[in-house]
Amino acid sequence: MTSLAQFRDAIARHAPRDGTFASVLPGVRLIRCATPTMPMPVIYEPTVCFVAQGRKRATLGASVLHYDPTSYLMASVGLPVMGAVIEATPARPYLSLQLDLDPALLSELALQHPRPAGDRAVAAGLTLNAMTPGLLDACTRLVALLDAPDDARALGDLVVREILYRLLTGPNGGVLRAMTQADGRQGQIARAIVWIRANFTGACRVDELARVAGMSRSTFHQHFRAVTAMSPLDFRTQLRMQEARRLMVGDGMEAATAGYAVGYDSPSQFSRDYSRLFGVPPGKDASRLRLESRAASPLSPVHGV
C-alpha cells in the first residue's frame, strides 16, 4: 500500500461520514465530503490543509487556488475565502487533514533553524505548495496515531513538530517565518486584519488602518493587497457579506435587515454587493440555502480548508 493510500485510509477511519471531526490532538481536524459543494464563504485562520483524496478550490479576491493530494494549502493570516469541494463522490469522497499553525511553536522552530541565506519571506497570506514525500509520511503517521488515543496524546506533539519543521524549511517557509515576526510586514498587516474583523460594520478608513499597521498609506495599501489579494474595502465587504449570509440563513433575518446589521445604509447597495459576490440577490440566495439545509441529512457540516 502506498503512503497516499495509507493516508487516505487513516482519515477515512476517523471521518466516517460527511463533516469536520476534531481529534484528541488540539488543532488537528479531519474533513470528509462525499459530493461537490457550492462555493461557501469561510474565514481561513492560520492553518494548513493536506488532501488525501479529491480536490478543492479556494478563491481569495482575484486569486483562485486548486489543491489536491499533490499540493497543500497554507493560510498564514485570517482571510475571508470562498471554498468549494470540486471533486468528490460517495465512492471516493474528499478527505483532508487540517492542522492549525501554532505561532509559539513556529517561533521556537524558527529560532532553532535560522533562515537560510537568500531565503526571503513571501508576502502572500494564502499559498499553494507542492506536497513532498517527507510531509506525506509525517501526515500519515499523525493520523494513524489516532487509532490509539493514548499514543496520540504522548507522541502527537512530536509529529506535529516535525510537520511544522518541514513546512518551515520548505520552499514557502518564509511565509511561516513572517508569522513569527510581529514587527515584520506580515505582522503589521495581520494587526490591520484583526482590526477590520472586529470593526467591519463601521467605516473602513485607509488612514486609520495604516496607523494600526504602523505604515504609511501607500506602503500599507501595497502590502495589504499582497497579503490578502484585495483592497481593504473589498476585504471588509467580504466580511460583511459572510455575516449577512449567516444572519439570513441561520437566524432567518430578512435581507434588508441583514444589510443594515452589517453596516449598509442602502438596501440597494447591499443587494448589488451581495449579488456581485454570490451571483444572486440576497433574498433568493438565502431562500435557496434554507431549502437545501432542510433537505440535507442531519450530518456535521463541512467547514475548514
Image (cartoon, rainbow, N blue to C red):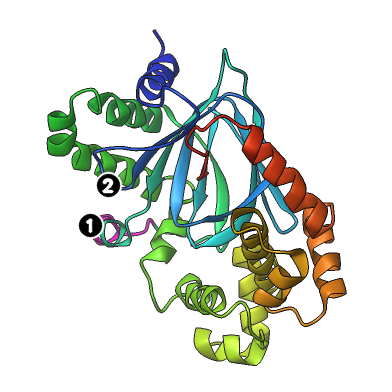
| Residue 96 screen position, x and y as percent | 47, 32
Residue at 84 percent across and 53 percent down: it is: 280
The vertical placement of 157 against 143, above or below, is below
* Whether residue 113 can be seen here: yes
At 77% across and 51% down in the image, what residue appears? 285
Q: Position of residue 102 (x, y in %)?
A: 32, 56
Instruction: Please report the residue visible at 68 percent of the width from the left and 45 percent of the height from the top.
Output: 290
Q: Which residues are magenta?
A: 108-116
Q: Which of pointers 1 and 2 lies earlier in the amino acid sequence?
A: 2
Disc number lying in front (1 or 2): 2
* Residue 242 location (% of width, % of height): 64, 60
Identify the residue at horizontal 58%, vertical 87% (top origin): 210
Residue 268 vertical placement versus 130 (above, below)? below
Q: Is residue 214 visible in this depiction of the protein?
A: no
| Disc 2: which residue | 26
Rendered image quadrant of residue 239 = bottom right
Disc 2: CA contacts within 10 A as few (<14), some (14-19) or many (>=20):
few
- SS at mark 2 in the image: loop
Q: Which mark is residue 112?
A: 1
